[in-house]
Amino acid sequence: MDRAREKQILIAFFDILGTSRLLNTGEYHKVYNYYSDMIELCNDSHTPIAIRNPFFGKRELLGDLNDVMADLAGFDIPYHIINYDLSHAFFSDTFLLWIEIDSFHNPLIGGFLEKCGIVFCEALKRGIPLRGTISVGIAIMDEEKRIFLGKPLSESAKAEPHQRWLGIAIGKSIVESIERFHPMDMEYLLPFRKHMKYDSDPLLSDFVLDWFTYWNKNEDTDVKEIIKSMNTEIAFEDYYKNTLLYVIHSKQRYDIWNEYMICQDIEKLKRLCDMGENISEKEKFLRCQGVRLLTEDEIMENIRYIVNRDEGIWFDEKNRDVLLMFNSGFIETNGIKMSIDHLKSLYG
């Protein structure tokens, strides 16, 4: 018997919330029509994925090339766009969307995230409550035999019931495979944790798909009214409240991203300072670089703006105290409050 081919996939696992109600009220035709439209979407369109061009800015290293070869190399083009086929599988109240990717090319995932955002928004427009998770990893996706196995499927399937909302979470496998999100991918993401059932989840990252930004650009209907109208079961009331809370966060996405990234950098700096001098030269360089970057005028101005907002939404309320202290000219290292000026004199 031939060995099944394993492939690296980027996959979204979707589940329809409250399926029993849809079945008991005869609304499963609504789901059938939605699935039919989504299959058509998958079959009629490709998913554009940007991959880094390994020849970008390296013309001098490759010597003299004729015009044809130079054009093919694209020395002045940082990214190439490749259209991937969007595969799908539907099982009653659950369905999968995935593309096969090559991690060697360090692909950006924004094109796939946008497709998932469209799928979610189309469900909302039809009053279908959807939640899901996006993961990445090695899997067997045998469409002919309808056999689907692999770690990303396991992660996304297990993570889906860990969420109390309508929305799409980003699995930890995504974050673990990407050192830092590219700005083009960040357009589709938002730091958000209010939907998690557990404070520290082994399967879910701090990020979710920011579908509301897509909705805001392409739809005229007030999505909050749609979400409120779907809230008809007491058992799921908190799910809809958390979804509305996400919409509020999305409206302040610029501030939340600033808060999240600055606080992440402050925490990294604190860890390096806590380690004292018994660290590598690379870590010493990163510590000095962190001090310089975090005390730049632009960053300090951003911090002042964040802490002085009248009605600011916070990704994490604990970040308020961290930024207030930093804005006042202090940072806590090894449990001791140290002035930023002293820190700069030591490491800046």
Image (cartoon, grey):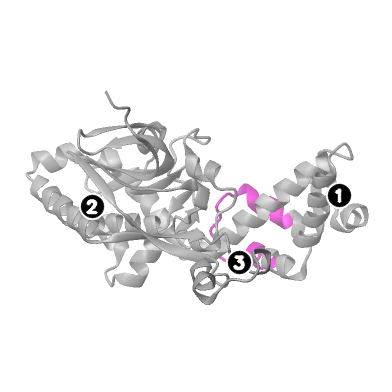
Residue 118 in the image: x percent, y percent? 30, 60
Q: Which residue is mark 1?
A: 338
Q: Is residue 253 left or right of residue 8?
A: right
First in residue order: circle 2 vs circle 3: 2
Q: Which residue is mark 2?
A: 230
Which residue is situated farthest in the bottom direction here? 67
Q: Which residue is mark 3?
A: 309
- What's under tag 2, amino acid-wise? Met
Q: Which residues are magenta?
A: 304-324
State which quarter of the image contains the N terminus: top left
Label 1 SS: strand
Residue 22 in the image: x percent, y percent? 14, 43
Label 3 near label 1: C-beta < 8 Å? Answer: no
State which quarter of the image contains the C terminus: bottom right
Label 3 SS: loop
Q: Which residue is painted at 63% across and 56% down in the image?
A: 261
| 256 part of magenta stretch | no
